[in-house]
Amino acid sequence: MGGTAAVEAVDLVKHFGTNRAVDGVSFVVPEGTVLGLLGPNGAGKTTLVRMLTTLSVPTSGTGRVAGFDVVTQPNEVRRSMGLTGQAATVDEILTGAENLRLVGALYGLPRAYVRDATERLLDRFDLTDAADRMAKTYSGGMRRRLDLAVSLLAAPPILFLDEPTTGLDPKSRSGLWAVLRELVDEGTTLLLTTQYLEEADQLADEIVVVDKGKVIAAGTPTQLKDEAGRASVVVTLTHARDLEAAADLVRAHSPEVHVDRTSRRVTARAGGLGDMTRIAAAFEASSIELDDLGLARPSLDDVFLHLTGHRAEDADSTEDAGPITEGAAP
Amino acid sequence: MTTLPTTRATRPPLVRPPLSPPSLVRAASTIVWRNLLHIRRMPEMLLDVTVQSVMFVLLFAYVFGGAIAVAGSDYREFLLPGIMVQTMVFSSAVVATGLTNDLQKGIVDRFRSLPIPRSSVLVGRSISSLIHSSIGVAVMGLTGLLIGWRIRNGVVDGVLAFLLLLLFGFAVIWLGIWVGSIMRTVEAVQGFMFTVMFPLTFVANTFAPTETMPAWLRFVAEWNPISAVTQACRELWGNGLPAPADAAWPLQHAVPVSVAWSLLLTAVFAPLAVSAFRRRSRD
């Protein structure tokens, strides 16, 4: 896509005293794509975002946003991006509409535009009814939405989101994801940080995994999952009595077979779709009845465990480990 | 929330208009507008400069007034300049709490992520605090007029004294910005500012003449910048006699010394404040 870099980090370092919060991080976000910075609490994600959005000065290294240097051209950077910080930084004493008007005035946007954009953004984020209420009366989710609306007021081509859905209930979270996808469709470049593997998997074109201030892996969600371990074929039988026969049948195609009696499952290491098709054909030819046959890929949670040796904190996503079913019972 | 993307997707996306990043004056006045909106939403923020102002003027005038003898003038005449200077000094506490609050809540980060001149946040804060304190001075002045305080030396000197108050207020605001940038919580800032400001505004000629103080305390009080400003206002408004002949040198030249103190305090605290604020908001 695009080809030109919307955001670029070159060997960024930030030390706080003796603490190396960010310790030489590099990545590129091409225009129009979504980069997910994935890592546990304290990995250095927020510090990275703060450096790239001119809020924090790097100890060393270079950051560029829309081609502008974050240290020497901070104003050009600020004009090119929007930021939604980790804590919703809305003014609680002002109403939702006033928060937008305040930021509109500080951007120096034409009044008529601010009026129109305010109305549209409040509508888009379902805040029209609350427009004239002080933000301190808003729920957590509403504040987040208002914060995002404020960041979008000047229609920035690049948007930074620091843990945009932390603390949101699942419904608000998926709603926010939908809005973010719309923005991407409209051509916005996103850099988002998250502790949620599922979120990175859902939204990001490219994931950079950071831990203790360093990049420990990077790639597409699929690449990362492939790295963590190969896929496996999971066969669920209708009758437990067929388990031995099924295991023998699978063994002909895969060296590593695991039988789980309680779930009536036979799991086998597989190279990919080819192995699955061969195994499926073998069952087709046999008399064994199947409930399900599918290819399971490791979840990003597994990836994280594999890379860091510890689980991502707060990782609430265990559900995406389910098999990617590419053909039900034959 | 789940329903919104499907229903709203039909709207054309916002098209970015030309940005004309605001000048310092415009950005700062926008921030002042925002701070004044806060006051309008929470009128209780003005209690310290309205109800309290009236209360303190009346308390001092009637409770202590009878007991404190002031040479050549009525105690109420003596009191008003002193208590007004105290109010201006407390604007440093107002600016410090406001700033810490904004830093804590991430509002300063929000402002700093926008293409506005770097100093607009501080300038906006300072101006709002001066407005805040000026309201206090105005309320006190009106209360004073009701109980017998007068400006006796004409309009020019009268206005000059108010300008002097503003100048001194501007100087101490830097102290507030410095403290507000160093301290982490609003509670800490309030605790610190009040612990420092009370002795500072009382060990002076604000509420009682310095002549009766022990020699060492009198020395401290008379060299206190607050005393010079108070004495300057008394002289410009014609409230009481000039400083006694044995008073310390600053009180003999109260008006120029007040200006000098204000400039000196600004020269010392403004760089400290700006660098502390930068450090605080850079990491």
Image (cartoon, coloured by chain):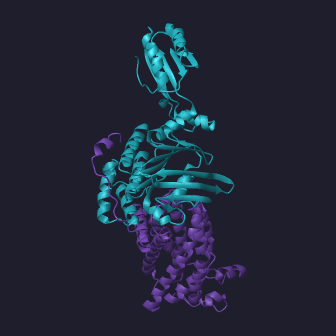
Q: Quadrant of residue A90?
A: bottom left
Q: Nearer the viewer, residue A303 or B223?
A: A303
Q: Quadrant of residue A171?
A: top left
Percent x, y of residue A317: 50, 34
Percent x, y of residue A124: 32, 49
**So how many labels did they put on this image?**
0
For chain A, the rendered hue is: cyan
The vertical placement of A161 against B136, above or below, is above
Which residue ends up furthest to the right in the rendered image? B216
The vertical placement of B103 against A142, above or below, is below
**Chain letter for the purple part:** B
Q: Decide if residue A295 is on the left or right side of residue A11.
A: left
Quadrant of the snapshot with the N terminus of chain B: top left
Q: Decide if residue A115 is on the left or right side of residue A253.
A: left
Q: Can the viewer see residue A26?
A: yes
Q: Nearer the viewer, residue A149 or A28?
A: A28
Percent x, y of residue B245: 65, 92
Q: Residue at x 49, y 73 (%)?
A: B58
The vertical placement of B7 against A231, above or below, is below
The vertical placement of A219 against B45, above or below, is above
Q: Nearer the viewer, residue A237 or B74?
A: A237
Q: Can the viewer see residue A87?
A: no
